Amino acid sequence: MRLDKFLASFSDYSRKEIKAVLKEKRVTVGGSVLTDPSAHINPETDIITLDGEPLVYKPYIYFMMNKPAGFITATEDRRDRTVMEFVPREFLKYEPFPVGRLDKDTEGLLVFTNDGELAHRLLSPKKKVPKVYLATAERKISEKDIKAFRKGIYIDEDGYTTLPGDLKVVSEGGNPVCEVTIYEGKFHQVKRMFEKCGNRVLYLKRITFAGVALDDSLKTGQVRELTAAETDILRSCFKNE
Ligand code: URA
């Protein structure tokens, strides 16, 4: 990797500022001062310091967002505002992307990473990764609805029946609030499952993804890096492979 690219990724300086930093002899690689931005370094084996402090090489980033309603889950869009507006600059330089998608009006847990392999596995329909949502419904939930969710619901004109899920009523006064667990991520899946039961989702929030729970101290629009224990939970979905 070029030295200036490494420094731009793992320090707070932009690529432009790095040129000056190097000229000022503030960077060492393996104990020697380097000033050439195009010098090649091995970020996994070379010890690189800036102002005497070692820079820790971290190829991957994993973080969660409490997604606000009104933003689409995409890295860019010509029409709509995207969730990327809430990703801080120091995370953006890792080129993260959201793992899966929440609808524009859905809130809650969105995991981001630049680890393509893990993301691919988490999104594979074969892996049946669990996702838990809180859904506020328009009408009362019946025993028949609960059984239908447990059996799998026919949601598509093209003959698709969802995998068995779980529907639990957590509060009944007024519009019922339910906890919904599904093991796939079809377009508008939770909303369509409710619609097939003659009901309607008024509000939807994801609270867990692949066993990782939304940190409820995060306000909508806030992000935080996953802990090592949380990234282990994501990987543990595949530990027997
Ligand atoms: N199901 C939906 O209907 N919408 C979402 O955003 C996620 C799951």
Image (cartoon, grey):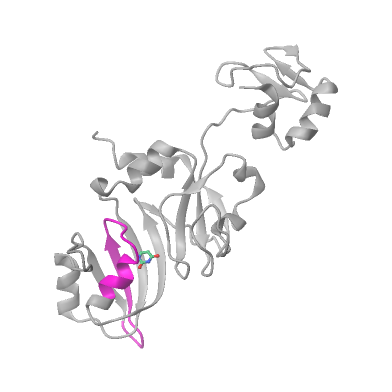
- The image shows residue 167 at horizontal and vertical percentages of 24, 70
Above or below, 75 relative to 66? above
The magenta segment: 172-194
Q: Quadrant of ligand 1?
A: bottom left
The quarter of the image holding the C terminus is top left
Q: Residue at x 74, y 22 (%)?
A: 37
The quarter of the image holding the N terminus is top right
Above or below, 35 relative to 121? above
Instruction: Report whether 211 appears left or right of 61.
Output: left
Q: Nearer the viewer, residue 187 or 232?
A: 187
Q: Nearer the viewer, residue 179 or 165?
A: 165
Above or below, 70 relative to 13? below
Does the magenta-highlighted stretch encompass residue 8?
A: no
Q: Nearer the viewer, residue 226 or 189?
A: 189
- Picture quadrant of residue 133: bottom left
Work out which residue is located at the far bottom of the displayed protein and give it.
174
Instruction: Report whether 103 appears left or right of 171.
Output: right
Above or below, 7 relative to 151? above
Q: Residue at x 23, y 46 (%)?
A: 126
- The image shows residue 74 at horizontal and vertical percentages of 50, 55
Instruction: Report whether 32 appears left or right of 76.
Output: right
Does the magenta-highlighted stretch encompass residue 185?
A: yes
Q: Residue at x 65, y 27 (%)?
A: 6
Q: Nearer the viewer, residue 196 or 52?
A: 196
- The image shows residue 138 at horizontal and vertical percentages of 34, 84
- Picture quadrant of residue 52: top right
Q: Residue at x 29, y 39 (%)?
A: 238
Q: How many marks?
A: 0
Work out which residue is located at the far right of the displayed protein and give it.
24
- The image shows residue 227 at horizontal and vertical percentages of 48, 43
